[in-house]
Image (cartoon, helix red, strand yellow):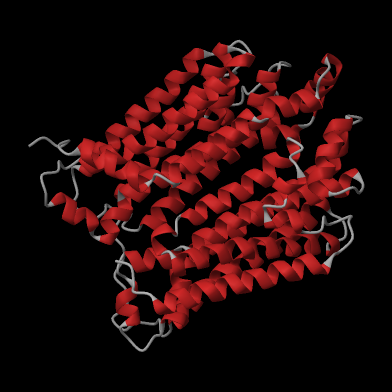
Amino acid sequence: MTSLVGTGVLLRFNLRRDRVMIPVWVAVNALMVLSMPNTLKGLYGTEAERTDLLHQVATNSSFRSLIGPVFGDSLGALTAWRVGVYAGALAAVTGLLVVVRHTRDEEESGRQELIASAAVGRRASLTAALGAAAVANAVLALLITAGLAGQGTAGALAFGLGIAGVGAVFATMAAIVAQFTQSARLARGLTAAILGAAFVLRAAGDSTTDDGSSVLTWLSPLGWLENLRPYAHERWWVLLLFAAAVLIQGAVAYALAGRRDVGMSFMPTRPGPAVGRLGTAAALAWRLQRGSVLGWSIGFFLAGVVYGGLTEGAADLVGDNKNAREIFERMGGHSGLTDAFLASMVGMLGLVAALYVVGSVLRLHGEETSGRAEPVLANAVGRLRWAAGHLVIAFGGALLIMLLAGLGFAVGYGKEAGPILAACLVQVAGVWVVGGLAVMLHGIAPRGATAAWGVAGAVLLIGWVGPALDAPRAVLDLSPFGHLPKLPGGAMQWQPVLILLGLAAVLVAGGLAGLRRRDLTT
């Protein structure tokens, strides 16, 4: 029996399990990219406007560090500049989530041991996991290439392959990290930290040069994507860097997979104390989620500092461009440009916080389906008490990270902190509604609980792309964030905030009632 026997069956099984997650992540990424040419055409329709944009980016190191340098004035080149870094990062997140889900997650739950007892090769599970990530990357590359072909076939192909290449690099990186940790949560966190380091390296390099030539930029796969230069005399040889990284990392992952037992790792978890120190279900929930809360808190604070520091330069970048000003006003309200920029950035962080609350709520689902909840509930712990520990961290953590984001904005902007903190806290109502939907799905329809990721992705897409496309009000109102007051700069409206908070409470109550009445999922 070879080490790859059963790979095809496992790959089909993985794709079936991810029939919701992969299409949602790929669709959000593709729509974000494909919506950009029309948006940019409306913003910079004349050659003079595009020339002025190139000059502003070349002389504004803060915006280069955030988005990257721009290498051409065509719509295709501007699209690659505007969304390239973020599309690559989103592809990387998709890859690492898929690979960890089908490797370390399976071993941690004990399902991999059952699979390995059948006629399945030693490296079949790893190959199937990488195959599922490859399918996601291939579909994404195909959609981007086909969608941007009207701007130029060569540039569209380069851009699609580059984004897929970033996804493949971090998929194989996750495959390596999964060999070293016994916890899927830690594997995801470490790979995400490597992605964050790649973003920081690229940002530091781009802040010092306007042509992507910094050594720091070349140390990051996100830097390789921008140096591929789609629609600006493509550097096809850069694709060899992606191929080499994938092959080397894949080989390392395969070598490591053959040198350990199922369920074990090269960095085993240290044994706990002889006498347990966790006396309550809430303490256990905090122990399980404290790393996630800490990571999100640091990330949101730093994001606030960065966006706050960019606020003064926002007016210079927009200049007299009426269309760009209108987009900021649709996202941030009809106030001054500075307040509109702050409101739009605060709104974006609120949308991202929805991803945190969904992941934290679904920790309940992971504990239940893995069988770890049963021993806890077999003691004198009721279901509502067990769930409450995780939900306090999920909803309280959302409040915490938005508060820290507001403090970061205040530090970066250097102006009065009160209005910015209020703007960030208002976003919590929308975040809690998304979290309430996740609780409802877990409590009433546990098999479809992961659809909460689709809800969060749809909300993110509406909030990010909708204003740029001047989407109808009816579409924007599908998102709870579309009903929030635009702060700072706008008038505070308590009615929609209180309604959303009430809706979140109803959803949570309905989900907990369903959890209390149904059987546990195994």
- 152 or 269, which is in the foreground? 152
Where does the N terminus fall, quadrant-wise? Answer: top left
- Name the spot of residue 212 as percent of width and height, x first: 63, 24
Residue 89 appears in view: no
Q: Is residue 82 left or right of residue 364?
A: right
Q: Residue furthest bottom?
A: 380
Residue 189 appears in the figure: yes
Q: Residue at 62%, 74% (x, y): give it.
A: 505
Q: Is residue 94 above or below residue 411?
A: above
- In the displayed image of the protein, which residue is found farthest to the front? 474
Q: In which quarter of the view is residue 395 placed?
A: bottom right
Q: Which image quarter holds the C terminus?
A: bottom left
Residue 59: x and y in percent read 80, 27
> Is 373 in front, or is 421?
373
Left or right: residue 155 compared with residue 207? left
Which image quadrant is residue 108 in?
bottom left
Counting from the top left corner in percent of width and height, residue 294 is at: 55, 62
User: In the rendered picture of this protein, how many numbered marks are placed on residues?
Assistant: 0
The residue sitting at the left extreme is: 1
Name which quarter of the figure residue 421 lies in.
Answer: bottom right
Q: Is residue 85 above or below residue 521?
A: above
Q: Residue 203 at what x, y percent from top left?
A: 64, 36
Left or right of 443, for residue 434: right
Q: Is residue 68 or residue 513 the one in the foreground? A: 513
Name the residue at 33% across, 64% down: 369
Residue at 82%, 55% (x, y): give it.
486
Height in image: 373 above or below 40?
A: below
Give the residue drawn at x 61%, y 73%.
Answer: 506
